[in-house]
């Protein structure tokens, strides 16, 4: 049976996001200098290059589950995608992973040079918080809390901290607990905040917040475990993979268990959480059948 694509499952949400993102870095008369124009082109080159938009889609789905309009969380959806895109630009730089291709296209620094790519990432990170401040200026307490949540998820004790752990320990033996922490920080934190911050914006109740926190944190871990399985090459095992610590079979078992925990957390929403359940299933389907 042919797998259902992410695009087929979430066509409406993806179209909503794709229609909105180009407005943020549109060409204006303020970009009269060559340097600003190149920087703007560099930003759009990566931001508008497609991809699954997994994180902003999760933000919109959270609003739907809570009965809120997607417009309410749109600033958050954009800010999360800005930060995710900046992280990819910087990851690809020679000082990090030194990748020359991203989604089948030359990476940002290959096209625009290292300095411009570095600045494009800096601009996306900075503008993410500008978007939030402007988007929630009529609800300052909500805006402040969401800015705090996203900054924490992206910073020292979130995505960037996970990247630092991953790089520093690349030549060292890793325990299972350490690999789980790296995955939680490096990938899971930004996925989790996409859901948790949306729940805060939509004024979820305490039980709903707890359920969505449990769901999103397990989903974030499951997403990285699926990536590890998809990237697994027995002839060239990666130190940065969970599989390197416990093996392919145990990683598959763990992925299935984490996915079940994510789905179980949605019980209080009943049928309203169907789309969030589909995200869990889509992630499992990425790796094919799991025999445990």
Image (tube, grey):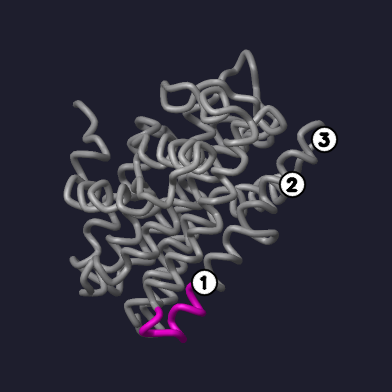
Quadrant placement of the C terminus: top left
**Upstream in the sequence, badge 1 or badge 3?**
1
Query: Pointers 1 and 2 in contact (CB under 8 A)?
Result: no
Q: Residue 217: x and y, percent?
A: 49, 60
Q: Residues within 10 Å of mark 1 (few under 14, many from 20)?
A: many
Of residue 131 and residue 156, the one placed in the foreground of this image is 131
| Closer to the eye: label 1 or 3 | 1
Q: Which residue is mark 3?
A: 172
Q: Which mark is residue 147?
A: 1
Q: Residues within 10 Å of mark 3 (few under 14, many from 20)?
A: few
Query: Pointers 1 and 3 in contact (CB under 8 A)?
Result: no
Of residue 231 and residue 35, the one placed in the foreground of this image is 35
Q: Secondary structure at mark 3?
A: loop
Of residue 33 and residue 67, the one placed in the foreground of this image is 33
Q: Which residue is mark 2?
A: 165
Q: Secondary structure at mark 2?
A: helix
Q: Is residue 183 above or below residue 140?
A: above
Q: Which residues are magenta?
A: 137-146
């Amino acid at each position: 049976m042919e797998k259902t694509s992410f695009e087929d499952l979430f066509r409406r949400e993806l179209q909503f996001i794709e229609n909105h993102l180009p407005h943020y870095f549109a060409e204006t008369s303020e970009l009269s200098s060559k340097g600003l124009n190149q920087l703007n082109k560099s930003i759009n080159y990566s931001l508008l290059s497609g991809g699954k938009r997994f994180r902003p889609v999760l933000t919109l789905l959270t609003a739907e589950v809570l009965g809120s309009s997607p417009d309410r969380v749109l600033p958050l959806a954009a800010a999360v995608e800005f930060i995710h895109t900046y992280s990819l630009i910087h990851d690809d730089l020679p000082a990090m992973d030194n990748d020359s291709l991203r989604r089948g296209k030359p990476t940002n620094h290959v096209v625009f040079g290292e300095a411009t790519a570095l600045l494009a990432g800096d601009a996306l990170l900075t503008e993410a918080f500008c978007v939030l401040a402007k988007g929630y200026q009529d609800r300052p307490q909500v805006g402040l809390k969401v800015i705090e949540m996203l900054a924490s998820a992206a910073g020292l004790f979130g995505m960037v901290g996970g990247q630092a752990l991953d790089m520093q320990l690349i030549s060292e033996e890793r325990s299972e607990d350490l690999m789980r922490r790296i995955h939680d920080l490096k990938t899971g934190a930004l996925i989790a905040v996409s859901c948790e911050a949306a729940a805060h914006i939509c004024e979820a109740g305490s039980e709903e917040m707890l359920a969505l926190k449990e769901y999103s944190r397990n989903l974030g871990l499951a997403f990285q475990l699926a990536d590890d399985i998809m990237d697994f090459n027995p002839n060239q095992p990666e130190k940065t993979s969970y599989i390197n610590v416990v093996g392919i079979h145990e990683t598959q078992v763990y992925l299935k268990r984490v996915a079940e925990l994510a789905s179980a957390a949605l019980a209080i929403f009943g049928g309203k959480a169907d789309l969030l359940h589909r995200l869990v299933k889509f992630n499992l389907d990425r790796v094919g059948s799991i025999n445990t």
